[in-house]
Image: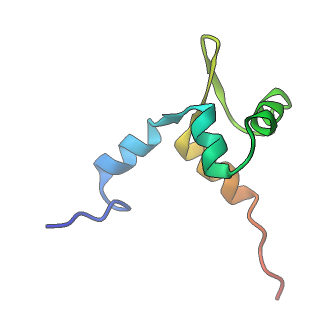
């Protein structure tokens, strides 16, 4: 039986707790690491610090992207 990842609570919980590195986020968003560093220093993108490292919560990053989605005109 194939599980639907969108409705599988284990998959959702794993995604919620997933933290991405700056390298991963820059690849996903297709932006340079310099741009990502600028956005974090300007607090334009949600992130958290773990020691000296910056990490990005997968779910919060998706929410941030969804808020920036442009809606088509009617």
Specify the farthest residue to the bottom: 74
Q: Which quadrant would residue 15 be assigned to in this image?
A: top left
What is the quadrant of the C terminus in the image?
Answer: bottom right
Q: State the residue at coordinates (77%, 74%).
A: 71
Residue 51 at x, y percent in the picture: 60, 10
Above or below for 43 versus 53: below
Residue 12 at x, y percent in the picture: 38, 49
What is the quadrant of the N terminus in the image?
Answer: bottom left
Q: State the residue at coordinates (31%, 51%).
A: 9
Residue 73 at x, y percent in the picture: 83, 83
Number of marks in picture: 0
Q: State the residue at coordinates (79%, 80%).
A: 72
> Image check: 42 left or right of 11?
right
> Image check: 8 left or right of 37?
left
Residue 45 at x, y percent in the picture: 74, 39
Above or below for 69 versus 10: below
* Closer to the camera in the image, 65 or 33: 33
Specify the farthest residue to the left: 1
**Colour approach in the figure:** rainbow
* Closer to the camera in the image, 60 or 51: 51
Above or below for 46 versus 63: above
* Closer to the camera in the image, 64 or 39: 39
Q: State the residue at coordinates (69%, 36%).
A: 46
């Amino acid at each position: 039986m194939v599980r639907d990842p969108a409705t599988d609570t284990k998959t959702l919980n794993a995604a919620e707790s997933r933290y991405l590195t700056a390298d991963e986020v820059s690849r996903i968003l297709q932006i340079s690491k310099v741009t990502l560093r600028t956005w974090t220093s300007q607090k334009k993108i949600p992130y958290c610090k773990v020691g000296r490292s910056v990490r990005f919560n997968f779910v919060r990053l998706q929410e941030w992207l969804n808020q920036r989605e442009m809606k088509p005109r009617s």
